[in-house]
Image (tube, helix red, strand yellow):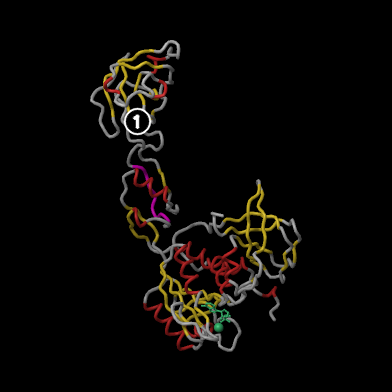
Amino acid sequence: MDSFSSLLSVEEARSLILSRFFPLGKIRVDLFGAHGSFLAETITSPIDLPYFDNSSMDGFAVIAGDISEASEKKPITLRLVGDIPAGVLPENGICSGEAMRIMTGAMMPQGADAVVPLEFTGLYNQPDDAIVYEEISVFSPVEKGAFLRKSGEDITRNAVVLESGKLMRPQEIGLLAMLGFTEMLVYRSPKVGLLSTGDELITHSGRLAPGKIYDSNSITLGALIHKYGGDVLHLGIARDDEQSITRLFDFAIENRVDLIISSAGVSVGAFDCVRSVVEKNGNLTFWKVNMRPGKPLAFGSYGGIPFIGLPGNPVSAFVCFEIFVRPALLKMKGSEQIREIRIKSALLEPVQSDGRESYLRASVFKDGDRFFARLVEHQGSGNLYSLVKANAFLILPSGVKSLPVGAEVDTWILDSYF
Ligand code: AMP
Ligand code: MG
């Protein structure tokens, strides 16, 4: 048995892995293909936003000074001189004593300096077509500038709006559309060669037989790669022999992957051949980390391409992916941060560990302004169902073997919707 203290800590292993990854090349993508990418250029606005002064309400464009004395008891009457639907250039301006009907988003006419919402006028709840009316009565004053969106009040022309490295979420992409961009420069997505190893594995579309199990890791890990913005090259299942593993690794290299991920076969079992294959065609930086689950975690390179060998147990593979592979993918995609949601939660039951840094599967919920955590039953590293019930990892630091009810624990939230 290893002395835990001689093994790499999770933090050391993660830093070592991250030091070997860099942002990939830049590519131009259109707005539809940008979601989840990281920007590789700085965006300055070519226009003022709003582009023109416009109304933020359905109502009447007026001169605020004309109606400063207006009240319910003493409404002020203004002459209606036109109608401005959205998308239309006002035909003329207004002078003192005049108003124009205006729709939300429509361009303000010359001369007007405020909008009176329909609700403050005698035409509220009246038949729709105001143009049949020649005048309106206004029951309330409005400030100069009220209910209008001034040109440039959100963004001014030439202002820097998005810095390089920014994650392209729906709102960033929408903003680029508002500014008239059709494409942008982002870091390209990593192509990840993914293989499973093990004589017991059959493909998920095959037939189960005694002694065999479905290869679920290819599916779970493939979905995780996809979730974090990588492109998956499914390499399939290698048998527990060096030749079979080498063949799939070489296929990955021929297909110019940016990273090779394998699962299983990196432990100390008689048929764990992945390590020897990697050592023959590259190098192994480490293959054990002081953590639970997931002690057998290998990192190195094969044919000049980075390689991460995840444990075979489905939960261990998942946990190690989140800790080690996800940040590597994000760094290749140009992210400058690791982006994890870590909070503190209070234990609703006591927890135990063996003293290695532990990632326990838990269900976390919010009550008032505090978070509470409960373990999701059986914590076996093969029990993927525990992860189905979980929405968080509880992290017990190395050296801690038990924690009582009520203890505040580091908690890594896996989904933001729970
Ligand atoms: P190993 O690391 O090869 O000793 O595998 C550890 C455990 O994970 C064994 O119980 C394997 O059967 C299981 N396992 C390995 N690969 C997979 C896979 N692709 N899908 C599901 N379970 C797996
Ligand atoms: Mg095996």
Residue 389's quadrant in the figure?
bottom right
Q: Which residue is mark 1?
A: 54
Residue at 33% across, 57% down: 29
Relative to 407, is 276 on the left or the right?
left
The percent coordinates of residue 283 (x first, y second) are 51, 80
Query: How many marks do you count on the picture?
Result: 1
Magenta stretch: helix, strand or loop mostly: loop
Does 324 sit left or right of 166 as displayed?
Answer: right
- The residue furthest right is 404
Q: Nearer the viewer, residue 140 or 21?
A: 140
In the image, residue 197 sits, relative to residue 383, either above or below, namely below
| Residue lying at 70% horizontally and 81% vertically, measured from the top left | 1
The image shows residue 235, relative to residue 168, as above or below, that is below
Identify the image quadrant of the C terminus. Answer: bottom right
Q: Position of residue 305 (x, y in %)?
A: 45, 75
In the rendered image, residue 145 lying in the magenta stretch gets the answer no
Front residue (pair 123, 302): 123
Label 1: few (<14), some or many (≥20) within 10 Å?
many
Q: Position of residue 300 (x, y in %)?
A: 52, 76
| Residue 149 in view, yes or no | no
Going by the image, does 286 lie left or right of 62?
Answer: right
Q: Is residue 358 among the parts visible in the rendering?
A: yes
Type of the residue with mark 1 = Asn
Ligand 1 quadrant assignment? bottom right
Residue 377 in percent (x, y) is at 66, 67
Residue 84 position by quadrant:
top left
Q: Identify which residue, 167 or 391, lies in the foreground.
A: 391
Q: In the orientation shown, which residue stands out farthest toward the top?
A: 74
Q: Secondary structure at mark 1?
A: strand
Stretch in magenta: 38-45
Above/below status of 327 relative to 59: below
Would the CB of label 1 be found within 8 Å of ligand 1? no
